[in-house]
Amino acid sequence: MSTLTNVRTLRGPSRVLLRVHRRTLWASGAVAAVAVVGMIVVVLLADRLTGGFADIGCTLNSSAEACFQPARDYSDRMLDLGRMLTYLGLALIALPAVIGAFVAGPMVAREWESNTVKLSWTQSSPPSAWLAGRLAVPAALVVCGITVLSAVLSWSRDRLGGPYPIFWHDVSVFGASGTVPAAGALMSIAIGTFVGLALRRTVPAMAVSLFVSGLVTVVLGMLRDSLWPAVRDTFAPGDGYLWPDGAAIIEWGWATNGGVLPADICADASVDHEVCLAERGVTHGYLDHHPASHYWPLQLVETGILLALAALAVFAAFRVLRRLHG
């Protein structure tokens, strides 16, 4: 019985929230739909370009002079299409921070500035239900929307193909795929709610929320390579070692009995490479990297960090609400 009561208690604030911000929600949905259509159009254009290039009997490796210009045109157009998906991926990475700023300002802080929060609390909805509605409704809508955008973007990249491969460890790929985008959205919503309650001023709350969420995204991107143990390969100079296909390279260089040397220590074309390495006492080379199999471990670790930050922000928001209401 208590569970049913809690659901009914939460339903009221959720309906009010959806009604008050319906125009913004419809506009956001329209933008998301346009983005999905745009990605599908990119794939269709890529398929058309690939089919047209194949019909003329040329390949990118063709030595026939008649194929030089068509190959160049095809490569340039596929590069432009690939860049469009890259920009969409970067936009998807930045989207959670923008959503958090909207939650912090118009959805939370503005109600304190206009004093409508007190009116909400005098109705049948207690403060905890008011806050839960501002967390649950955006979370449900945003996670669904970002998951769809991320899935369509990943599908578009897989279909694009062409002369410019896209690697899983690219910034615009890793941060816009898997479970990270949804977790980032939940974190930004939680931070936005906490900041909105703590500051209770629309513009400052939006600015601080945007800054904090963006800072977390940037810091995690910088620390990403260290979130999971890297693999180290060693090889002898001149043995023809080939770097693993599709790996995210972290660092490589040359090791001696006394330490390590930079990778370009003997890169000067005027010296014999192997003789130079021998003179410096190089015993072997090393390569630190994340193979493609590390995609999901890195995704899940980063997702866990984002969700932990979200939980911490939610806890802090309820603590602030208790103090304000008490």
Image: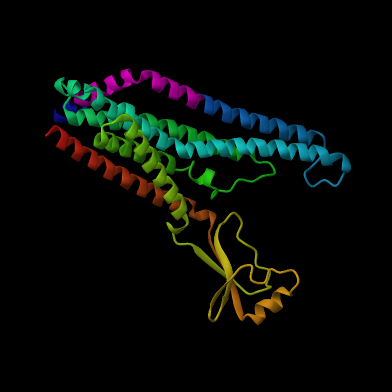
- Give the residue displayed 49% in from the left and 33% down from the top: 149
Task: Tell me where the magenta segment starts and ends, as one range.
Answer: 8-33
Q: Position of residue 171 (x, y in %)?
A: 52, 47
* Residue toward you, 65 or 1: 65
Vertical side of 109 occupied by 255: above or below: below
Which quadrant of the view contains residue 56? Answer: top right
* Residue 25, magenta (yes or no): yes
Count of numbered badges drawn on the protein: 0
Q: Position of residue 133 (x, y in %)?
A: 26, 28
- Give the residue displayed 32% in from the left and 18% down from the top: 19
* 107 relative to 123 in the view: left or right: right
- Going by the picture, which residue comes out furthest to the left? 326
> Which image quadrant: the C terminus?
top left
* Residue toward you, 131 or 158: 131
Give the image's coloring scheme.
Answer: rainbow
- Give the residue displayed 64% in from the left and 71% down from the top: 265
Vertical side of 168 occupied by 282: above or below: below
Vertical side of 11 occupied by 216: above or below: below
Name the dominant secondary structure of the magenta segment.
helix
Q: Position of residue 210 (x, y in %)?
A: 39, 38
* 163 relative to 154 in the view: left or right: right
> Which image quadrant: the N terminus?
top left
Which quadrant of the view contains residue 198? Answer: top left
* Residue toward you, 89 or 262: 262
Which quadrant of the view contains residue 50? Answer: top right
- Give the residue displayed 37% in from the left and 36% down from the top: 207
* Residue 174, magenta (yes or no): no
Q: Position of residue 13 (x, y in %)?
A: 24, 23
